Image: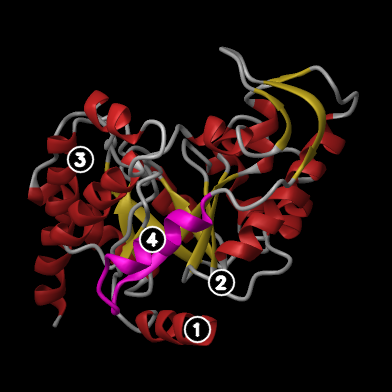
Amino acid sequence: MLFIYVLYYHLMLDKELITTTVGSFPALPSKKEFMDAYPRGPDPFETCIREAVNAQLDAGIELVTDGQTRNVMIRLYASKLRGFRIRERISIVDDIAYRGNITVADQKYLRTIIPEDTGVKGVITGPVTLVNSVENTHYNDTYEAVMDAANALGREAAALAEVCDVIQLDEPFLSVEYPEFASETVERVFCDIDVPTSLHVCGDVSSIARELVELPVDILDHEFAANPQLFDVYDDIDHRKRMAVGVVTTDSGLESMDTILGRIRKAYDTFGTGCMIDPDCGLRMLTPEIAVKKLEYMVRARNVFMKEIN
C-alpha cells in the first residue's frame, strides 16, 4: 500500500502548480455532537474532518489535510506525548517521549472519504516550536528538550509516512529565533521517511532563507502573500527546493481574483510550474465561509492561469 501512495504522489508531482493547504480548517464539533459522543458514541471529530476535507475537495484542492480539527497545533501534540502536563498553561514536567500514534488514525479515516487521485498531507508540530511554546520545568537545556521532542515526533512522522503522500513539519518559531541546531532537529524528525517532506515556516523568513534552503527537506512553504519580498529573496538564492507559495492571506479579507492571479504569476515566474500553491498559513481562525471562499478563489485563479500558459 505504501508503494501505491508513493508512486501516486510522484506521478502527481508532474502536475503543474499543485494546490494544497497548510493544515488547519475552522471546523469544530457542536455541543450536541459532543454530548452524543459521551460515553461511547460516535467520534464527533470525524464529522469535522469530513467538513474540512469536503471543503478542500469542493474547492478543487489536490493535496489535502485533515484540517487539524482535534485541537490547536501545540495542544494537539503535547496532549499525546509523554512529558507534558496539560493545564491552562502547558508545561514540560518529565522527559519527552512517544506514547503512540497521534494523528495517524485521522489520516487513515481521511483516506476512506477522498477520491483515489487525491493526495494526503500529514502535518506535525515542529519540536522547536513545541518546546518554545510551553513552560519548561524539567530540562536544564533547551537543546536536550528539543532533541527528545524531535525523536518522539520522528516516530509519528514514520507512522504517518505509511499513510500520507507528504509529511509537513510546522516550525513557525524558526522565523522568531533560528537555533544553530535547526538542521539536526529536522533531520531527526524525517530520518525514517520515504515520502516527500515539507517545512512550513510562516512570517518573514528573509533573514534565514539561506539557512532554510540547506535543511534536509524537499519542500519549503512560506507566507508569500503577506511577505511578497520573499520572491526576490529566494530568486537571489541558488537552490533546488520545491516551493509552496502562499497566494492568499489568512486574515478575514477576501482578495480579488486579480490579486491572487498576480501572485500566482509571480510564483510561476520565480519558481516555475513545479511550485505548489496554497494559503499563507492555516485557516483555523477564519469563519468557515471565508475559509471556503479563500480556497475557491485560490483554485479558480490557478485554473485561469493554467489556461493562460497552455
Instruction: For residue 9, say whether it is visible.
Output: yes
Sequence-earlier tag: 4 or 1: 1
Amino acid found under the numbered disc labelled 2: Glu
Q: Are marks 1 and 3 in contact (CB under 8 Å)?
A: no
Quickly name the residue at label 2.
162
Question: Is 250 or 89 nearer to us in this picture?
Answer: 89
Q: Residue at x 35, y 72 (%)?
A: 272
| Span of residues in magenta | 103-120
Quickly name the residue at label 4.
109
* Alpha carbon distance from label 1 to label 2: 8 Å
Q: Neighbour class for label 3 at 10 Å: few (<14), some, many (≥20)?
A: many
* Alpha carbon distance from label 4 to label 1: 15 Å
The x and y percentages for residue 72 are 45, 32
Instruction: For residue 180, say whether it is visible.
Output: no
The residue mark sitting in front, 1 or 3, is 1
* Residue 89, picture quadrant: top right
Quickly name the residue at label 1.
1
* Alpha carbon distance from label 2 to label 3: 29 Å
What secondary structure is found at the residue carrying circle 2?
A: loop
* Alpha carbon distance from label 4 to label 2: 13 Å
Tell me if residue 118 is in the magenta stretch.
yes
Q: Are marks 4 and 2 in contact (CB under 8 Å)?
A: no
145 over 6 or under it: above or below: above
- Pick the quarter of the image with the C terminus: bottom left
What secondary structure is found at the residue carrying circle 1?
A: loop
The x and y percentages for residue 6 are 49, 81
Amino acid found under the numbered disc labelled 3: Ala
Sequence-earlier tag: 2 or 3: 2
The x and y percentages for residue 164 are 48, 68
Tell me if residue 198 is in the magenta stretch.
no
Tell me the tag on residue 291.
Answer: 3
